[in-house]
Structures are given as structure tokens and as C-alpha cells.
Image (spheres, rainbow, N blue to C red):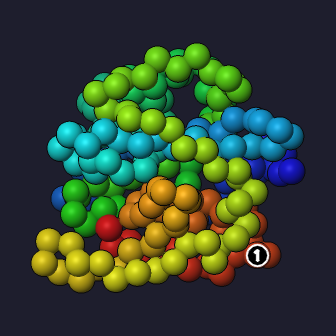
Amino acid sequence: MIEKEKIRRVITNRQRRSLPPEEKRRAAVLVPLYQEGGGFQILLIKRTEHLKVHQGQIAFPGGTWHAGDANSIATALREAHEEMGIRPEDVEVLGELDDTSTATSNFLITPVVGVIPSSYPFQIDTGEIAGFLSLPLESLRDSQAFTEEIWDRDGRSVRVFVRREGPHIIWGATARILLHFGEILFPATAGHRSGPDTM
């Protein structure tokens, strides 16, 4: 099992890639970790089908930066509280991963990794969240679980990273964040395929 302090060191003792905002909307997501069965799990959400953007997708809790947010960490914690009822004081922030961007929805996303207590009493915004999906952190050792596909999006061909978990398809920015997280945590087994951002 990879220890919490090692995760923190790996994230903070590296040069984080920050992308220029240009014309994109700044956003942040929380990558929630919790302990179960002797190891860490990564918690993801399934978004509801009626949202304006990213409807029905597997994602991390998060959203757009607001003027009152001091930084990306504040954005991620505020959004996680609004969507899932996770109180900011209950999150032990371990650090920020590399920025990633989306082409279709025009977001610049900063992922914030944080540990939450196990068996957390979530208060779900059912207008945004339809369900949960958990992945063992150790499963990110297998970079080959991510495949690269060419999809047709709005009449153009785009390169997409995809990971299939049973009936669920994790793709786009969420898949890239998971792939990048695995590459920095488990460099000996990673194929370093996260590459440029396309969706």
C-alpha cells in the first residue's frame, strides 16, 4: 500500500505544470481519496443527465472558479461541499496535479488531491450527482487500462483517453487526470502516455 505521506511527497516534490488560462474558464476538481481495506480508494461521481455540460459523465466533484475563491484549492473544496456535503475542514489536501484543459467545454482544470474520512456522511446534491464510483488507487499502476481512441465530437475527430470499469466509461479530462496521477505515483510501471490535452 502506498502511504499518505508518500503521496504528498510525490505531488509536492515535483514541478507542477501550470497552463496559461488564455480564453478558457478556470476550474478545479477535488480528487478525493479515502482508506478502505488497507489501501486508498479514489472516489468519483456520476453526473446527472440533465446538466448543461458533461452530463452523465464519470467525473470528480468540482466546478468553475468564483471571484471569492482564494485559489484552486478553495474552488475544489467549495464545489465538493456544494455537490457532496464534504466540509472543507474534513479534507486533508495533499497537493495539486498538473493542469489539464478541455476543448469542447473550454475549461482549464486544476486537480486537487485530498484525503477524506472513510464512511463519510455525504449530503448529495441530487440535481448534479446520480451516483458514485470507486477505484483502488493501486489500480493506477496499470497504465494499459487506459486506451487511446479517436472519437467524433461535434463533427471533428479528437483523440480521447478512455478507461472502462464495468458498465462505466471514464474518458476525457477525468481519464487524463487519473492517468497522470498514476504516472507520477508509479513511474516504474507507467508508460507516460498522458500527452497533450484534446478533450
Q: Say which quadrant the C terminus sits in.
A: bottom left
Is 108 located above or below residue 118 in the figure? below
Front residue of 5/22: it is 5
Front residue of 50/74: it is 50
Front residue of 77/137: it is 137
Q: Is residue 123 visible?
A: yes
| Residue 110, horizontal then vertical, whole percent | 44, 50
Residue drawn 65% across and 39% down? 33
Q: Is residue 72 visible?
A: no
**Label 1 amino acid?**
Thr
Is 41 located above or below residue 84 in the figure? below
- Graded by Cα atoms within 10 Å as few (under 14), some (14 to 19) or many (20 or more), the crowding at tag 1 reads some
**Residue under numbered circle 1:** 189
Residue 154 appears left or right of 63: left
Residue drawn 83% across and 51% down? 2
Is 178 located above or below residue 85 in the figure? below
| Residue 84, horizontal then vertical, whole percent | 45, 25
Residue drawn 30% across and 62% down? 102
Residue drawn 46% across and 80% down? 148
| Residue 96, horizontal then vertical, whole percent | 56, 48
Residue at disc 1, secondary structure: loop
Q: Residue furthest front?
A: 167
